[in-house]
Every structure is written in structure tokens, then in C-alpha cells.
């Protein structure tokens, strides 16, 4: 939970009971009906209980008024995950002819404490839709701020992808991905976004046009951190179903070789070679030697595995014991196909 | 390694109501139906569902139903697919599906399918593969899958497949183990698992196991007990569960127990909650931990309940 700060909404300041606020005069609080002997009975805090009692009252009479809007703000501040409260808020906003920019500011306040709340993000999208393409740059900036706090926030990424597709703003997106990956090259969300951009951006020409330069980009990231799962999967994704091209890109073979020669963090390099071997790859002597040199004495003599693929699986079974069964299975696959 | 403190967990679930002022209690009002599903399914897996008065639960659930046919998270709340599924699952637990006006529930769900095959969660139109699962699982339990366009629903889910073999919430979104469960579950229920590259997805899923033995939901994220459910159930549905180290995962889940007051947390030494208690116990059930009922990985219900739905009364 976020700690309290001065920027937080009204609901977190000293609680002024609604019963003593003039704007709520005449509202009869309506308690939650939890049914008989509740299954999962709920204990309510006083401010929560009072807010929700007033909310239910105004909601049940469908009072579309400024004080209802205020009450939804209060209810959201005590519990931003309540679908019904957001639902009512949208009805009130539409009835009152809301200032949508002001509403964006409201959601930004809520996001500071609840950046992982589904309802908030859906509401934000609803408001941005009202504003149309003019909202694109503000929405991209908003998610950028969220990523400064948590660069893997799933909701914010989903929102950002929606903004790009529905409202536009693709121009700087590839640079933005590069920036995030510079900050943290292990950020799988940023790698995913990069793939999203190169495959979907209307200005980049699609995967075929981008493949060549992206292979270099991924390989550079691999050399910096060969244990990083993301660029390896990205590299494979660049070739998608194009097995022939994947098989024949010598840059991939050299990258694997270079990682093997360093003799550490070689799991994904070996696994990639295993994939390639399965597709008919014929490695040169240098690659064969590099694989053989990774064998430890536990694995016995180099010739004891029937071929290179078996050898790779034996090495990985020792290196990655948690997934020993997976590597054993890969070995069986390799044997049955050879 | 410690043991499963089953009795403590039963006590914990039954006593959630007494934990005054806990954050968990306050935020649960609107999703009490989800809470009921988590708590009651856990009780059933532990063999203690009979400690609850089923008539009271059923009458409360019916009060959560909206005139549209969908269910809200509590009495007087707006309907949503998330709660509609929980309502149907809990009624199935108690063998009380016959109290439902099945046409009404079916109409509610059917109306939420979009032209592209996806599902909105409610009338406000949020689209997410989670809702595809809710709709498909619900309709399968009600034996009304024929009321939606299954082919389109499957096509939409397949369009959310990612380069690593997993699935995201919408097309282009990152793989996430929770979304993968929803997509694999929906594909399993509709007999469409052939759309999955099982070897590729299986490898990505087993890579989610980290040194502590726990599972994370995405690369480089922390392990969390809830992924014991999302990842494991997905691995089982694609027949690849033996690719992870089961013993280490069991130890991780048991280490997340509050052995004094009951309940299971996301990670060792964190505060327990009912959500993680369910996912921990259900995860152990998927791992065939002794003394627990078996769980169906697609329907997220005890196997005997699923058998009763589809094959009649084969156990009591």
C-alpha cells in the first residue's frame, strides 16, 4: 500500500462525517444488505461504511447531481475497485456534461495510489475516448509517468497499446522502447512493446522491413546479458514462422558461438542451437568444439552422446536441474527425429 | 519440510468475518462473490464444505442476481462476468445449479460477446481474455456453449497469442501467466487446444519457476503463490506439468502458510488473504498433495464437482 502523501485525494484527509456535511443534507444512508449469516462477512471501517451507505442511497435513487459526483470520488478513495461506483460515476458525468480534461486529472490522482486497479484504467480509456485523437499525447505521457514508478505495469501497457491503435502517436514509440530497455534491458514488457511497434506501427513497414536491424539490436542485448530470456525470445519472434531465414542467418550462429565461448550463462544460446539443429542446421567445427568444451566430467566422454543435440540436452540438464525433465524430453525429441 | 496446516486454514476461512478493520475486509465488499468462491472452494478441497449452511449461501447468491441475469459482487451491485462465473461455480459446488433460471443467465452472457468474438466484462465494454474465459467456463457449466459463437470466441483468443507461445489480455499484449490460464482454459473447454504450441508455451511456463521454487507470472518478476495456480493449471492442461520441480514448488507454497492462525500469503512472511489461501491450496491439489480433493485445471472446481455436472451423480 502506498503511504499517505499530500497529493492524495480528499478521502485520505481527516475524515469529516458525511452526516455533518451540508451538501449531503436530506440523504438517508442505506446500509449494505449482506444477507443472512454472511458466508464471507465483511468488517467495515467507519468512514468506509458511512461513505458506502450514502453512496447506496444516491445510487438507488439514481440522483445524477454534483453531490453524487463528489460521493463517487469519496467512494473511490475508500475503495477504487468497486465496479458499481465507477459505473454510477460515468452516468453522473454524462448527465452533468462533464469537463473531460478535469476527469483525466481526477483519474491521475487515483492512479497515484492505485496504479494496478482495473476499473481505473477502463474509466481512463472511456474518458480518453470522449476526447479522441487530441488526447493521444497526454495519454502517452500519463503512461510514461506510470512506467517511471513501475515499468512493467500491465494495465498501463495495455492502455498505451490501445492509445496508439485508437488515437495514434506512433512516431516516437520505437525510441521510447529503446529508452526503457536502456534503463532495464531485462524489462520483458518493453521487449513486448518493441515487438508490438515493429509489427503494428503504420510508419515502419512491418516485420519484414524491420527484421534486419532488429536482429542486430537483439544480438547486442544478448551479448550484454546472455542470461536475459527476453532478447532471445524476441530474436526468435523476429523470424516467427520463417524457419528457412531463421536457419540461415549467420549472425545468430555467431552470437551463439560467442556466448558459448565465454562459458557462462549459455543456457539460451544452447537452447537456440538445439532449435536450429532440429530444423536441420549444420554447425561448423568451431561450434561443435565450443559445445563439446562445455561438457563436464559428470557427463562422461564426449562421444557418449549419440550426437550434438543429445550433448546439448545433457549439458542443460546439469546446468538447469530445476527443469531437468524438460531437457530430458528435448533429448528424447532430438533422438527420435535424428 | 512443513506440512499443510489444513485445519488452521479452515478456521481462517471461517473467521475472516471476525478480522475487524483489516484492509482485506474493507476492500472485499464489492467482490464478496469472488471471496465466497475462493473460500468455499478451498473448504471443499479440504473436505470441509459441510461446515457451511448451503441454503443460506444459495439464497444470498440469488439475491446478488441482477434483473439482466448477471450477478453482482454483492447484493445491490452491478452485474459483471467476473461475479457471474463465481456465482455459477459456487452453485455447482453445492449441486444447486437447478435454482438458476439458466436461460436468463445465458442471455446475459451471450449479449456480452462482441463482433470480433471477444467478450466485454459488463455493459461498459472493457474487453479482456479474462472475460472470454468467464463466459466460456460459465456457459459450459450451464451446458449452453451453443448459445455463443464459439468459433469466433476461439479465434479472438488465438489472436492474443504472443511470440513466446503465451497469451495476453488483448492482441499484442505481453504474455502473463494469469491471462495464459484464461486462454488455455477457454481453449481446453472448447476442445481447441490444437491452436497452442504446447512445447513452446510449456517451456515459457516452466521457465517461470525461480530459485526459491516458486513461480512468477512474467520474466524477472517475483514469485507469488497465485501463480502456483495460473502456471500449474496451464501446464497440466497442455500435459507439461512434469517440466517443473514439483517438490520445490510444494515447499514454496507450504513456506507461505501462517501455521499459527491459518491462511496462505503471496510470499513467505507476508500477510495472508483468502485469495492466496485458495491459490495455495488449489496449487497443492494440482500437485496431488495428500489429503486434498483433486482439482480440475480448466473449470477451477473440484474434479468430483465437474464429474457431477457432466456425468451425473457419480459421488456424494
Image (spheres, coloured by chain):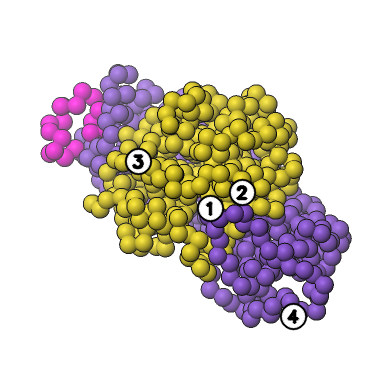
Instruction: Give me the residue at 68% from left, 75% from top.
Output: A10
Instruction: Give me the residue at 74% from left, 43% from top.
Output: B67
Give the foreground label among 3 and 2.
2
Question: Residue B132 lies in what quarter of the image?
Answer: top right
Q: On the image, numbered disc 4 is attached to which residue?
A: A20
Q: Earlier in the sequence, mark 3 or mark 2?
A: 2
Q: On the image, numbered disc 2 is attached to which residue?
A: B60
- Dot 4: chain letter: A
The reply to the same-chain question for discs 3 and 1 is no
- Dot 3: chain letter: B
Chain displayed in purple: A
Give the foreground label among 3 and 1.
1
Q: On the image, numbered disc 3 is attached to which residue?
A: B292
Please name whichever residue, B72 or B315, is drawn nearer the observer in this view of the structure. Answer: B315
Q: CA distance from mark 1 to mark 4?
A: 34 Å
Looking at the rendered structure, which numbered label has been put on residue A164?
none
Q: Secondary structure at mark 4?
A: helix
Chain B, colour shown: yellow
A74 left or right, relative to A100:
left
Q: CA distance from mark 2 to mark 4?
A: 34 Å
Amino acid at each position: 500500500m502506498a503511504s499517505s502523501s499530500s497529493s492524495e485525494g480528499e478521502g485520505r484527509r481527516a475524515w469529516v462525517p458525511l452526516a455533518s456535511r451540508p451538501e449531503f443534507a436530506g440523504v438517508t444512508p442505506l446500509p449494505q444488505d449482506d444477507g443472512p449469516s454472511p458466508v464471507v462477512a465483511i468488517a467495515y471501517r467507519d468512514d468506509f461504511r458511512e461513505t458506502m451507505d450514502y453512496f447506496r442511497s444516491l445510487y438507488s435513487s439514481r440522483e445524477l447531481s454534483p453531490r453524487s459526483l463528489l460521493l463517487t470520488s469519496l467512494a473511490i478513495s475508500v475503495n477504487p475497485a468497486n465496479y458499481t461506483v465507477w459505473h454510477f460515476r460515468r452516468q453522473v458525468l454524462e448527465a452533468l456534461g462533464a469537463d473531460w480534461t478535469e476527469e483525466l486529472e481526477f483519474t491521475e490522482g487515483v492512479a497515484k495510489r492505485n496504479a494496478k486497479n482495473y476499473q481505473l484504467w477502463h474509466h481512463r480509456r472511456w474518458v480518453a475516448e470522449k476526447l479522441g485523437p487530441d488526447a493521444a499525447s497526454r495519454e502517452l505521457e500519463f503512461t510514461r509517468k506510470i512506467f517511471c514508478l513501475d515499468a512493467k505495469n500491465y494495465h498501463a501497457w495495455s492502455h498505451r497499446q490501445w492509445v496508439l491503435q485508437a488515437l495514434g502517436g506512433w512516431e516516437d514509440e520505437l525510441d521510447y522502447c529503446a529508452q526503457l530497455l536502456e534503463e532495464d534491458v531485462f524489462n520483458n514488457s518493453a521487449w513486448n512493446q518493441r515487438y508490438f511497434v515493429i509489427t503494428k506501427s503504420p510508419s515502419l513497414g512491418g516485420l519484414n522491413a524491420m527484421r534486419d536491424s532488429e536482429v542486430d539490436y537483439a544480438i547486442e542485448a544478448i551479448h550484454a546479458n546472455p542470461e536475459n530470456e527476453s532478447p532471445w525470445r524476441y530474436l526468435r519472434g523476429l523470424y516467427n514462422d520463417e524457419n528457412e531465414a531463421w536457419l540461415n542467418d549467420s549472425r545468430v550462429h555467431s552470437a551463439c558461438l560467442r556466448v558459448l565461448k565465454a562459458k557462462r550463462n549459455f543456457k539460451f544460446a544452447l537452447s537456440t542451437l538445439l532449435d536450429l539443429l532440429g530444423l536441420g542446421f549444420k554447425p561448423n567445427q568451431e561450434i561443435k568444439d565450443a559445445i563439446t568444451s562445455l561438457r563436464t566430467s559428470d557427463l562422461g566422454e564426449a562421444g557418449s552422446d549419440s550426437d550434438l543435440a543429445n550433448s546439448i540436452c545433457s549439458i542443460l540438464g546439469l546446468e538447469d536441474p530445476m527443469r531437468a525433465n524438460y531437457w530430458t524430453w528435448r533429448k528424447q525429441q532430438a533422438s527420435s527425429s535424428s | 519440510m512443513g506440512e499443510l496446516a489444513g485445519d488452521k486454514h479452515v478456521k481462517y476461512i471461517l473467521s475472516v468475518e471476525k478480522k475487524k478493520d483489516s484492509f482485506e475486509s474493507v476492500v472485499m465488499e464489492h467482490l464478496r462473490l469472488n471471496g465466497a468462491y475462493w473460500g468455499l472452494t478451498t473448504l471443499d478441497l479440504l473436505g470441509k464444505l459441510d461446515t457451511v449452511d448451503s441454503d443460506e449461501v444459495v439464497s444470498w447468491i440469488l439475491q446478488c442476481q441482477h434483473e439482466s441475469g448477471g450477478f453482482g459482487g454483492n447484493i445491490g451491485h452491478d452485474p459483471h462476468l467476473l461475479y457471474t462465473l463465481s456465482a455459477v461455480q459456487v452453485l455447482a459446488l453445492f449441486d444447486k445449479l437447478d435454482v438458476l433460471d439458466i436461460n436468463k443467465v445465458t442471455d446475459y452472457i451471450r449479449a456480452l460477446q462482441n463482433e470480433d468474438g471477444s467478450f466485454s466484462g459488463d455493459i461498459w465494454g472493457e474487453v479482456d481474455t479474462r472475460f472470454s474465459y468467464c463466459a466460456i467456463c460459465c456457459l459450459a457449466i450451464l451446458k449452453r456453449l451453443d448459445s455463443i459463437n464459439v468459433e469466433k470466441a476461439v479465434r479472438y483468443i488465438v489472436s492474443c497469442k504472443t511470440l513466446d507461445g503465451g497469451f495476453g489480455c488483448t492482441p499484442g499484449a505481453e504474455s502473463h501467466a494469469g491471462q495464459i490460464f484464461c486462454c488455455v482454459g477457454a481453449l481446453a473447454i472448447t476442445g481447441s487446444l490444437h491452436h497452442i504450441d504446447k512445447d513452446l508455451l510449456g517451456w515459457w511456463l516452466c521457465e517461470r519457476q525461480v530459485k526459491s521454487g516458486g513461480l512468477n507470472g512474467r520474466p524477472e518478476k517475483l514469485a507469488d503463490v497465485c501463480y502456483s495456480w495460473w502456471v500449474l493449471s496451464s501446464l497440466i492442461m497442455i500435459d507439461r506439468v512434469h517440466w517443473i520441480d514439483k517438490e520445490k514448488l510444494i515447499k514454496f507454497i507450504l513456506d507461505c502458510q501462517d501455521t499459527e492462525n491459518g491462511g496462505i500469503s503471496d510470499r513467505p512472511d507476508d500477510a495472508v488473504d483468502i485469495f492466496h489461501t485458495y491459490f495455495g491450496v488449489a496449487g497443492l491439489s494440482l500437485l496431488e498433495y495428500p489429503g486434498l480433493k483433486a482439482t480440475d485445471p480448466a473449470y477451477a472446481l473440484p474434479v468430483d464437482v465437474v464429474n457431477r455436472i457432466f456425468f451425473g451423480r457419480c459421488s456424494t
